Amino acid sequence: MPGPASSAANRAHLLPAPASRSSLVIAALSALGVAALYLVFVANPLGQLIDTDAMHAVMSHASALRAPAARVLDTITLRTVLIGTVAAAIVALLRRRPATAAAALAVVGAANLTTQLLKVSLSRPWALNGDTNSLPSGHVTAAASVVAAALLVTAPRWRWMTAAIGATWLAAVSAGVVVAGWHRPSDVAAALLVTASITALTTHLLRHRTLSTRHTPPHRAPATRQTR
């Protein structure tokens, strides 16, 4: 029968690792960042003016980039997002990591659902030119969530390559929506933070599940009394 020390050790194994706790901190700070962006750049007229002026400045100084930006934004469709998400899940399944496959699907689904809910739920008081709320950007969320899913399922030795390719595409999409006049800078930042929060929370849950599974003691059949 295990003693108190053994029981305490087993309980310690089930506690979140420092990396898992840091994921919760990142998730909370990212969510607070989204709230701060809304309060500063959407919920007051001065913030709206600064944000809109910033978008117009980018549009005017980068007018030559509108055609390339349009081509980049054309890569963000429901079809490409679904293909990227399913591909990430297949990679995880091929690596025999069904929980990671589920996590990749959850990141894409939850991040995009959260963005759409925020976009229709948040109001834009004192809107300039009658604009409706556009925070967070749906295009940026779609790209960021697919990149996050890819990073979750990629083997560590290839993760740097996935990160480099994903960051390049995500940067182009983020800049493109501003150059095209589709979104203000705060919309882009909010989309990135929404995805970061969802990804960090999903990573925490995945690590917690992995630790619980790894350190759950195997079931032992009850000992039978031998007869003489």
Image (cartoon, grey):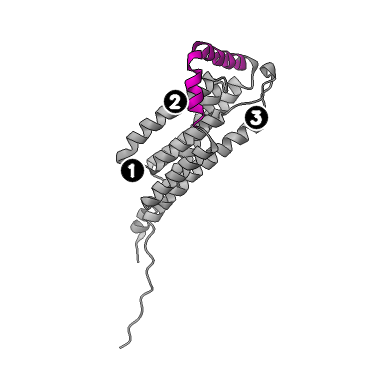
Q: Is residue 44 above or below residue 18?
A: above
Q: Residue 89: x and y, percent? A: 44, 47
Q: Secondary structure at mark 1?
A: loop
- The residue pinned by badge 3 equals 122
Residue found at x 67% / y 21%: 131
Specify the quadrant of the image occupied by residue 160.
top left
Tell me if 77 is positioned left or right of 218 in this view.
right
Q: Secondary structure at mark 2?
A: helix
Percent across and percent down for residue 96 are 37, 53
Which is nearer the N-term, disc 1 or disc 2?
1
* Disc number for residue 155: 1
The boundaries of the magenta stretch are 47-75
Residue 24 in view:
no
Give the alpha-carbon distance from disc 1 to disc 3, as whole Å.
Answer: 38 Å
Amino acid at the residue labelled 2: Ala
Can you identify the residue that label 2 sits on?
Answer: 171
Residue 126: image x %, image y %?
69, 18
Amino acid on which the number 3 mark rests in the picture = Leu
Q: Residue at x 53, y 14 (%)?
A: 59
Left or right: where 18 falls relative to 46: left
At mark 3, the secondary structure is loop
Q: Main secondary structure of the magenta part?
A: helix
30 or 168: nearer the viewer = 168
* Residue contact between numbered discs 1 and 2, judged by CB atoms under 8 Å: no
Q: Is residue 55 visible?
A: yes
The CA distance from mark 3 to mark 2 is 26 Å
